Image (cartoon, rainbow, N blue to C red):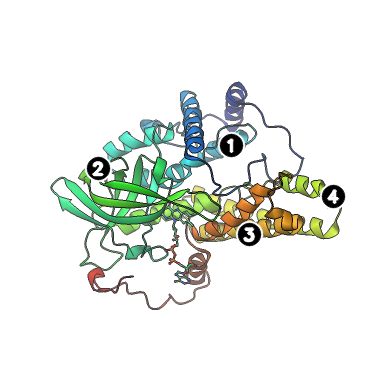
Amino acid sequence: MADTTLDDFRSEVTTFLDDHAPRREASVAFAWGEGDDDVALFEEITPEEEQRQLTEAKAWLATRAKADLHWIAGPTDLGGRGLTSAHEALYRSLETRYQVPNQGFFGIGFGMVAPTILAHATEPVKQRYLPAMYSGDIVGCQLFSEPGAGSDLAGLQTKAERDGDEWLITGQKVWTSGAHYSDIGEIICRTDPDLPKHAGLTGFVVDMHAPGVEVRPLRQMTGGASFNEVFFDEVRVPDDHRLGDVNQGWTVALTTLMNERASIGGGGGGGGGMGLASASRLIQMLQHFGLDQDPVARQELARLYTGYQVAKYTNQRAAAKLKAGGLPGPELSIGKLALTANLTATGDFVARVLGPRLMADTGEWGTYAWSTFICGTPGMRIAGGSDETLRNIIGERVLGLPKEPGIDSKSPFKDIAKS
Ligand SMILES: Cc1cc2nc3c(=O)[nH]c(=O)nc-3n(C[C@H](O)[C@H](O)[C@H](O)COP(=O)(O)OP(=O)(O)OC[C@H]3O[C@@H](n4cnc5c(N)ncnc54)[C@H](O)[C@@H]3O)c2cc1C
């Protein structure tokens, strides 16, 4: 199976997609951006509609699983197809040409939680959760941030205390995307406050339906409620659900964060595709408002195009490094920064074209979704490492600037002042 050529795989996937999903209407021919996705970010939808979309997305993954096209680069002993990341990328690119359900529900699970489980979990946990995640049976979320620990993640205070073969987790997480429809979460807890803050952490896989877990939605300025605060009150987790060794949770968290930057920055918006705001959509908008021959509008569109192309090549450089066996490096931080810069520039462009129409939902083409896009973009500048945090990383690791002063990483955590 591992010798399936890319050409053979392309035919197999095209046949599968032709059999199971309608093709998208051909969009304006232009060399970037495939598909014509909804541009809204973190938009408001009813719980019923969200549930309907989730059910549809799970059904689509089940269909892919029946054709062995759900975990293309995954190891065969865990139910994966055992092909390469190039096959995986080819599948994704072909799928964008078809109208398939929104698979964003699985973004965190596939992009961050599953790779961490694969790298650090015990064998029974891998067997129990990875096939179920990739075939859409269960959804995963990332339980890292806390009210007093975001950019300074190692300052987290949710504790896990050993109780025989189990651990008891108590504390609060916040900004947990998708916690309200997730079945499992990857959580980082403090297991030894006598150690310095990076040293006393441990990762676990926690059952989001376990007694003592309470999920409360948080409303965003877009009107949506895609993230939550999550409370843990002596939640029991078996020791075999531990990720990595006790007090080695920082390494586990770094695995997730690297994958997070790769999956956010390397996604459509940071890379070659316009992704969230396809080129065809912007061109249609200019045509709709009679601006497609306007030299300033055309120049701005070309500048956006350049930004997306630069991001695409940076991401390809990072991908090539990973493929060659290298470790993910600061390119991922640059990719994430490029994503938010491109999204912000896209929002500015759209705001100039639409003017006051942006805020007035007159029913005219696209105006409401664009206002949601613009209100949602600042969240993207924070999620997965804020712009400032990423610039610090680049300053230190690429430019060789001295490390930021003032972060106490040597004293026992219990002796450090907490927020
Ligand atoms: C849409 C969205 C989805 C999210 N989903 C999840 C999720 O699923 N799971 C999860 O665990 N978390 C999630 N988060 C949380 C996210 O990881 C944190 O918001 C982020 O790490 C920043 O932490 P904070 O909000 O505590 O802000 P803070 O760390 O308090 O930062 C506040 C401001 O100060 C700046 N700042 C902080 N430290 C420095 C410094 N050393 N130098 C310069 N500037 C600095 C920051 O850039 C920011 O502008 C999500 C956030 C958003 C917006």
Q: Residue at label 3? A: 344
Q: Which tag, 4 or 2, sits closer to the chain's start?
A: 2
Position of residue 238 measured from the top left corner of the image (x, y, whole percent): 21, 43
Q: Inspect this view and state whether residue 312 appears.
A: no
Q: Residue at label 4? A: 290
Q: Which tag, 1 or 3, sits closer to the chain's start?
A: 1
Amino acid at circle 4: Gly
Image position of 177 (left or right of 308) = left
- For the residues labelled 4 and 3, the Cα–Cα distance comes to 23 Å
Position of residue 164 measured from the top left corner of the image (x, y, whole percent): 13, 47
Amino acid at circle 3: Thr
Q: Residue at label 2? A: 211
The part of the image, by quadrant, that contains residue 130 is top left
Q: Residue at label 1? A: 90
Report the mark closest to the observer, 1 or 3. Answer: 3
Bin the neighbour count of mark 3 within 10 Å (Cα to Cα): few under 14, some 14-19, many 20 and up.
some
Q: Is mark 2 within 8 Å of ligand 1?
A: no
Amino acid at circle 1: Leu
Residue at (74%, 37%) from the top-left corner? 27
